[in-house]
Image (tube, coloured by chain):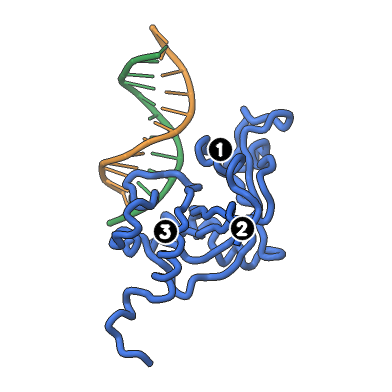
Chain colours: A blue, B orange, C green
DNA sequence: GCCAACGTTGGC
DNA sequence: GCCAACGTTGGC
């Protein structure tokens, strides 16, 4: 495996753009536009690399949590929605000659066998360091430790609900 | 819909 | 540069 491979958690409101929307996109690939936070922008522009793995997180919904995996298909390039007056993410201070905001392309990989909910993440001691467990954290692009990534995958393969249930 | 936790803006 | 006001995020 590529030693430089990194893991990220990307938040999206499923009402606006769910993992199913991504899976249904042409080539299962879409631009991750609309990020308007400088810290998230810095990660997108400077650190998110092609081939990095993305944990797709559904936020602001009845059951928030990690629902699937995606990968970075294209590294940072200017986000044109910043200079589209019709876009909710329009930012008149960002000029095409000197873009303020960047986006990457992401490609759908798969749904997790079962989603790992925020409550499961909070209940898991090994995941106590994850940014998403911190109250008030609004960062929509977050780095994920490899050990946390592995833990998430384990939990997705063996959901809490199945523990203690007879095998079948 | 409520509200806590931020981040941004703008007056001074 | 300080800080109050305001806007946004996002869980509940």
Q: CA distance from mark 2 to mark 3?
A: 18 Å
- SS at circle 1: helix
Could you tell me if the residues under marks 3 and 1 are in contact, i.e. CB atoms within 8 Å?
no
Relative depth, front residue between A50 and A65: A50
Q: Circle 3 sits in a helix, a strand or a loop, which is it?
A: helix
Residue A144 visible in rendering: yes
Residue A80 in view, yes or no: no
Q: Which residue position holds label 3?
A: A148
From the top left corner, tell me how far across and down residue A158 is, in percent. 39, 76
* C7 lies above or below A127: above
Labels 1, 2: front one: 2
Q: Which residue is mark 2?
A: A2
First in residue order: circle 3 vs circle 1: 1
* Quarter of the view holding residue A80: top right
| Label disc, if present, on residue A11 of the rendered structure | none
Q: How many numbered callouts?
A: 3
Residue A128 on image: x %, y %: 32, 54
Q: Nearer the viewer, mark 3 or mark 1?
A: 3
Letter of the chain that mark 1 sits on in the rendering: A
Residue A158 appears left or right of C4: right
């Amino acid at each position: 495996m590529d030693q430089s491979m990194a893991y990220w958690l990307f938040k999206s409101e499923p009402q606006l753009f769910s993992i199913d929307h991504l899976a249904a996109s042409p080539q299962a690939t879409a631009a991750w536009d609309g990020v308007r936070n400088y810290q998230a922008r810095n990660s997108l522009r400077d650190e998110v690399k092609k081939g990095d793995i993305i944990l797709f997180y559904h936020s602001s919904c009845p059951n928030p949590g990690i629902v699937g995996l995606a990968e970075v298909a294209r590294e940072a390039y200017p986000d044109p929605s910043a200079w589209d007056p019709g876009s909710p993410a329009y930012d008149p201070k960002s000029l095409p000659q000197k873009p303020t905001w960047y986006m990457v392309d992401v490609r759908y990989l798969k749904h997790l066998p079962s989603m790992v909910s925020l409550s499961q993440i909070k209940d898991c001691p090994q995941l106590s360091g994850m940014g998403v467990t911190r109250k008030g954290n609004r960062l929509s692009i977050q780095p994920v430790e490899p050990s946390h990534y592995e833990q998430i995958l384990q939990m997705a393969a063996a959901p809490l609900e199945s523990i203690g249930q007879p095998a079948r």
